[in-house]
Image (cartoon, helix red, strand yellow):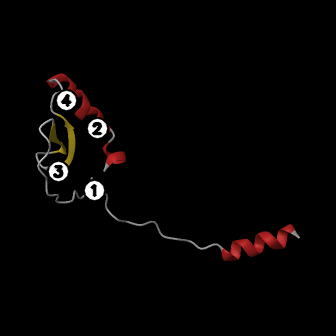
Amino acid sequence: NQGNYLLEVRKELKIYEAKSDKSSIDEPLEVELKDLPPHLEYRFLEGDDKLPVIIAKDLSVEEKTALITVLKSHKRAIA
């Protein structure tokens, strides 16, 4: 009978607490930056040393600014 089946399923379900781990945005990790090939450079999404990203060095200033703006707006998905 379906009613008994649902009752049994409910008994087997477990409730889990959500993890409260902080994201790398809330607590950025210390990272060691490596030397990059000459056509790449580091930029940071937070301050002068947090949430590094690697971008192409030959982008114009406007392109770099636009790229960093987009990356900052999506940093929760990236970090």
Which numbered disc, 2 or 1, marks the residue that appears first in the sequence? 1
Report which residue position mark 3 lands on. 50
Q: CA distance from mark 3 to mark 1?
A: 10 Å
Q: CA distance from mark 2 to mark 3?
A: 13 Å
Which numbered disc, 4 or 3, marks the residue that appears first in the sequence? 3
Which numbered disc, 2 or 3, marks the residue that appears first in the sequence? 3
Q: Position of residue 48 (x, y in %)?
A: 10, 45
Look at discs 4 and 3 and give the one toward the viewer: 4
Mark 1 crowdedness (10 Å alpha carbons): few <14, some 14-19, many ≥20:
some
Report which residue position mark 2 lands on. 71
Mark 3 crowdedness (10 Å alpha carbons): few <14, some 14-19, many ≥20:
some
Q: Position of residue 15 (x, y in %)?
A: 56, 71
Residue at disc 2, secondary structure: helix
Residue in the picture at 11% in, 38% down: 38
* Front-lying residue, 40 or 11: 40
Quarter holding residue 59: top left
Which numbered disc, 3 or 1, marks the residue that appears first in the sequence? 1
Report which residue position mark 4 lands on. 64
Residue in the picture at 23% in, 59% down: 27
